[in-house]
């Protein structure tokens, strides 16, 4: 089945799902120190962890490892959830689970980041988690920068440095037959085959012009000089410059 997560020793189809009212009641009891309620909350939200790790299924990571890491994020969400706010637990829990998995993937990444940049990134993530725990919402980059007394650019660079790299062959869409990968959406407008061929054709066409015509085009279109400036430098009239320029451009268009 598509999107099905296989876990060793866990029958995911039989995992319990809590209703909102049950979750609320268990959260209140867990906050009061009831360990049994805390265990029931963890067991009743494992499907939430499963739904999150599906997002990371194309990274080649072991599903059991991601599930265990996601459970750590779930436990942190349960322990830090503010029951005084009118917020659904899943709204708060999902970012916590995602953050824990991303931290795991980042620490196990093959990409090497400098220690100073990594330390800054950890501080940013800790500030972000602290803000989410207190306000039950994601902070802006400016708010994180203010909290840590850093420049906005430093916060952005630190977060970008620890992002998980994406393979050019990662699929982003499939209609059942053809699959579109990341590389299909990446386009270099300057170095396409069409541009390369046009440059060769242009060079060939220019080579057939006279030396005077090539000089006039170079001065006009590469040096940005006016026809009057060209005429003064070459020693011919502006009308002759205009005629030679038009003839040269006409010849290039004809050959291309």
Image (cartoon, grey):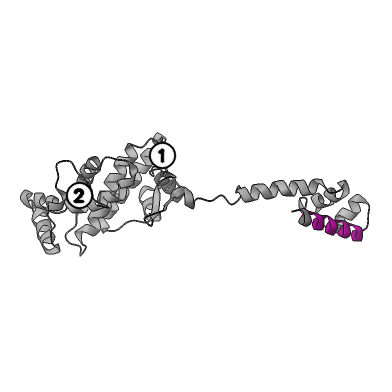
* Vertical comparison of 91 with 154: above or below: below
Single out the mark in the foreground, 2 or 1. Answer: 2
Q: Which residue is mark 2?
A: 74
For residue 96: magenta? no
Question: Residue 113 lies in what quarter of the image?
Answer: top left
The residue lying at 10 percent from left, 53 percent from top is 30
Residue 73: x and y in percent read 22, 47
Q: Quadrant of residue 102?
A: top left
Say which residue appears at 36% left-offset and 37% top-offset. 109
Residue occupied by mark 1: 117
Magenta span of residues: 236-252
Horizontal and vertical percent for residue 98? 28, 49
| Residue sitting nearer the eye, 5 or 33 | 5
Q: Quadrant of residue 143?
A: bottom left
Residue 199 placement, left or right of 61: right
Earlier in the chain: of badge 2 and badge 1, it is 2
Instruction: Tell me what residue is drawn at x 8 percent, y 56 percent.
Output: 29
């Amino acid at each position: 089945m598509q999107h099905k997560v296989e876990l060793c020793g866990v029958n995911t189809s039989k995992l319990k799902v809590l209703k909102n009212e049950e979750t609320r009641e268990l959260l209140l009891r867990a906050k009061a120190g009831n360990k049994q309620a805390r265990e029931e909350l963890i067991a009743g939200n494992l499907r939430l962890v499963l739904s999150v790790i599906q997002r990371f299924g194309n990274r080649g990571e072991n599903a059991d490892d991601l599930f265990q890491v996601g459970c750590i994020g779930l436990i942190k969400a349960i322990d830090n959830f503010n029951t005084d706010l009118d917020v659904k637990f899943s709204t708060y829990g999902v970012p916590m689970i995602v953050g824990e998995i991303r931290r795991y993937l980042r620490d196990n990444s093959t990409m090497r980041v400098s220690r100073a940049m990594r330390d800054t990134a950890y501080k940013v993530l800790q500030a972000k988690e602290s803000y989410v725990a207190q306000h039950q919402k994601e902070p802006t980059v400016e708010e994180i920068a203010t909290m840590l007394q850093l420049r906005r650019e430093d916060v952005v660079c630190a977060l970008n440095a620890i992002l998980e790299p994406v393979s050019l062959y990662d699929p982003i869409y499939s209609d059942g037959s053809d699959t579109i990968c990341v590389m299909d959406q990446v386009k270099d407008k300057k170095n396409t085959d069409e541009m390369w061929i046009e440059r060769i054709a242009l060079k060939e066409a220019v080579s057939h012009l006279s030396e005077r015509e090539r000089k006039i085009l170079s001065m006009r279109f590469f040096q940005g000089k006016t026809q009057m400036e060209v005429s003064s430098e070459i020693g011919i009239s502006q009308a002759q410059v205009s005629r030679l320029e038009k003839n040269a451009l006409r010849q290039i268009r004809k050959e291309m």
